[in-house]
Image: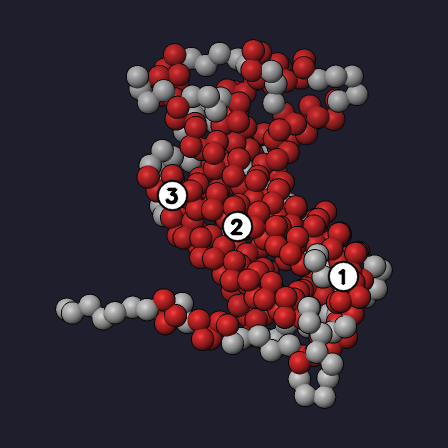
Amino acid sequence: MEHKPVYYKDYLALDKITNAQFPESFKEGKQPAHDEMLFIVIHQAYELWFKQILFEVGSVIDIMNKPQVNDNSPEMQTVVHRLKRCVTILKVLVQQIDIMETMTPMDFLDFRDMLRPASGFQSYQFKIIEAKLGLKFDQRHGQAYYTSQLNQQEIDIIKDAEKTKSVIELVNAWLERMPFHNKLEDWADYEKVYTNSLAEGEKNNADFFATILKQENPERQLSAKANRAALFIMLYRGYPMLELPFQLLDTLLELDNQLAHWRSRHINMVQRMIGTRIGTGGSTGAGYLKAAMDKHYVFKEIAQLSSFLVNRNKLPKLDDVLIKKLGYGL
């Protein structure tokens, strides 16, 4: 077939994108607020980046939802690569706040009241990201307010996302399939080493260690078997077979870290712009955002496993057969 020429403006639909800004203050009879254009462009950029994150996370879910994924396959490398891309995008989202903060509180007040009840809380794409990563409805702060500002179509899209398998659920299933060191008796020596490493007053750590490694808890997203596998990966990540699995766990933690960083910067910006005033969407503003930041960690159960690490010089030695498996059989 003859190739039809593709032109930059048409390929990127620039006419649609660059003509999709309609400042309220620019409408007839109103006093134009210069900074409203910046406000719109930045939030549109946010939504485009959210779309890209959803695209990447969706592809990760498709890969990890397969019946079997080789832990050191090109597919798993793709999963880690795309999740790291999401981390980098989130860093850009944080940096965009620097641009937003070139707008002063007085600049914002020039058009803020014209936006009611519009609010960033109405970003259904961001809620879908959280749902697909694994944030459940009953884990959210302000559940009654969660969908109150959305239309029914947006609510249905979010609920559909919450019904599908999330990244944390698929990671749990992947960890449970981990063939190495996953019997309870394999952990007897390590539990002794860990308990002996605790400082005075850390007895609760030992109790929690025994609980998450041995007992199932329906309130947790990771099973005891998955916890054992994840902890094993963290402890023995220096072996070749565990390098990629460790990268996956570490990248998930960095995703949570960057989401928290973005929320933190957002809180500081809101406090700077409106102080203690109510948000345009009716929330408590910075107060709501802070409570949500403290509660909305998706991979916190993986992060908790850092409490159970010991000095690598005290790690129990693995048997030779297992060492050979972890070294690609060399």
Please state which amino acid type lies under the numbered disc 3.
Answer: Thr
Note whether 118 is above or below 302 in the view shown: below
Q: Nearer the viewer, mark 2 or mark 3?
A: 2
> Which residue is nearer to you in this view: 108 or 54?
108
Q: From mark 3 to mark 1, how far is it between C-alphas? A: 42 Å
Among the 4 quarters of the image, the one containing residue 14: bottom left
Q: Are marks 1 and 2 in contact (CB under 8 Å)?
A: no
Write down the residue under mark 2.
89
Q: Nearer the viewer, mark 1 or mark 2?
A: 1
Write down the residue under mark 3.
78
- In the picture, the quarter occupied by the N terminus is bottom left
- Residue drawn where x is 70% and y is 26% of the image: 205
Q: Which x, y percent locates residue 133?
A: 54, 51
Label 2 SS: helix
> Which residue is nearer to you in this view: 226 or 149?
149
Q: Earlier in the sequence, mark 3 or mark 1?
A: 3
Q: Residue furthest bottom?
A: 29
Q: Which mark is drawn over residue 104?
A: 1
* Circle 2 residues within 10 Å: few <14, some 14–19, many ≥20: some
Query: Is any part of residue 288 visible from this angle?
Result: no
> Which residue is nearer to you in this view: 70 or 224?
70
Q: Which x, y percent locates residue 46?
A: 57, 60
- In the picture, the quarter occupied by the C terminus is top left
> Which residue is nearer to you in this view: 289 or 90?
90
Q: Earlier in the sequence, mark 1 or mark 2?
A: 2
Note whether 232 is above or below 30 in the view shown: above
Q: From mark 2 to mark 3, how far is it between C-alphas? A: 16 Å
